[in-house]
Image: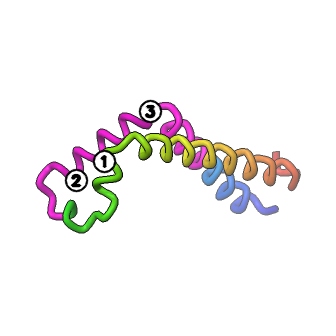
Amino acid sequence: MSSSQTLGLGLLCLLFFGVGIVALGWPEKLQEWALNFYGSGSGLAKWNPFLNWMRTSSYVVSLRIVGFLALVAGCLVLLAITRAGSF
């Protein structure tokens, strides 16, 4: 595996781990941020079909699921890097 491929996979791994940690650690903050973004008078709120669902607690649960899956994906990318012998 070339160094540019290793660098790309390493950045992808960091991205997955970052998204996973944020989504698992602070799902209520993400929900608050998203609702503030759409409630700040932007014209995008009328185009968001998920806005009512974003106000429910099931949205927080789905953020946690996405966070867990992102961490699993980060682990799999890290495994792919180590199996290729790049570390």
The answer to which of 31 and 87 lies nearer the viewer is: 31
Q: CA distance from mark 1 to mark 3?
A: 13 Å
Which residues are drawn in magenta? 14-43
Toward which corner of the image does residue 84 lie, by quadrant? Answer: bottom right
Tell me which residue sits at (38%, 34%) in the image: 28
Residue behind mark 1: 34
Q: Report the residue marked by disc 2.
A: 38
Which comes before the other along the chain, label 1 or label 3? 3
Circle number at residue 74: none
Q: Residues within 10 Å of mark 1 (few under 14, many from 20)?
A: some
Residue 17, percent across and down?
60, 42
Where residue 68 appears, as percent x and y from the top left, is 61, 42
Residue 11 x/y as whole percent: 61, 51
Q: x%, y% of residue 21? A: 55, 36
Check disc 3 and give the amino acid type: Trp
Label 3: element kind? loop
On screen, 47 above or below 70? below
Is there a contact, CB below 8 Å, between mark 2 and mark 1? yes
Query: Which amino acid lies under the numbered mark 2 shown in the image of this protein?
Result: Tyr
Residue 30 shown left or right of residue 41 in the figure: right
- The disc at residue 26 is 3
Q: Which residue: 30% across, 42% down?
A: 33
